[in-house]
Amino acid sequence: MKIRVMVVDDEPMAREELIRMIEDDGDFTVTDQASGGDEALRKLKQKPDLDAVFLDIEMPGLNGLEVAGRLADWPDPPLVAFATAYHQHALEAFEANAVDYILKPYDPARVRKALDKIKTRASDRRASRGRLASLEQDLVQKGLVKKLAGHRRNAKERIVIQPEEVFYFHAKYAEVTARLADQELIINATLKDLLNGLDPGRFAQTHKAYVVNIDRIEKVSPMFSGNFEITLKSPLPEKIPLSRRYARTLKTLLGSW
């Protein structure tokens, strides 16, 4: 039986070129294609028996990384190979957590290598789930993710977050949450991971358990022993601790107070 594949790319010519290269290998058949991440997810839900999907990274709507993040919640996701123009640090993360990656413009020999890897893993699709779940955290650690994915407690659905929407991140026990204006979401990353990936001109650590969006700060008030208290802007006028250890860095970012 042939290995069933979907190709996802918003560029029709690139999509057709990749389909041709895949079908040059007689062990594969491209059973479907999509021009974006949203369309790909809809079709993948209708065809849970697909063995593998080639995902372009940069697409309007849901991009390839976001699609992979959604697939990580599936009990038996297809194998994923990324098509990308990212630099070497990103490729290390893709290589560790995806079945393979191919660079644009497509090289037939490199595509054949990716197909060979899919052949060796096609019978063990369940292993794909763990790799996909690790991908986002690896990319955050390398400072390459401009969006984050979180989830509500006891819910499997992932919600894509724009970092600028976050008022603060809070670590409690082994869990990190992102506080938005209207909800709190659990993030699969440590505060250290987040600081490595977030804009250092916008986010700052204020306490061992807090990272705050400085654009959301209303005022800073002195407390005792050189510590401070941050009041956030409406609609979330909460109080966040600012310890003496982190005060100097925040002063630099704010100019002064």
Image (tube, rainbow, N blue to C red):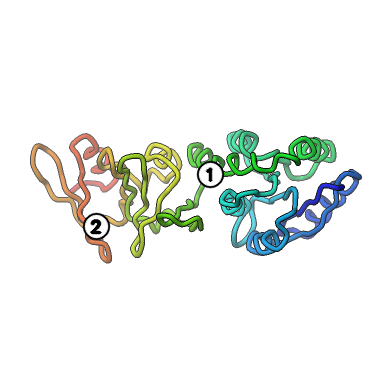
Q: Is residue 4 above or below residue 107?
A: below
Say what secondary structure mark 2 lies in. strand
The residue to which callout 1 is attached is 136
Is the residue 176 above or below the residue 39 in the image? above
* Residue 35 location, quadrant: bottom right
| Residue 187 at x, y percent in the picture | 42, 48
Residue beneath the point at 12% across and 38% down: 226
Q: Residues within 10 Å of mark 1 (few under 14, many from 20)?
A: many
Q: CA distance from mark 2 to mark 1?
A: 29 Å
Is residue 255 left or right of 44 when viewed as pictured?
A: left
**Label 2 amino acid?**
Leu
- As helix, strand or loop, the secondary structure at mark 1 comes to helix
Q: Quadrant of residue 247?
A: top left
- Residue 125 at x, y percent in the picture: 69, 43
Residue beneath disc 2 = 232
Can you tell which of label 2 and label 1 is closer to the viewer?
1
Q: Where residue 36 sits in the image (x, y, percent)? A: 67, 61
Residue type at numbered disc 1: Glu
- Residue 32 higher or lower than 190, as above or below: below
The residue sitting at 60% across, 49% down in the picture is 75
The number of callouts visible is 2
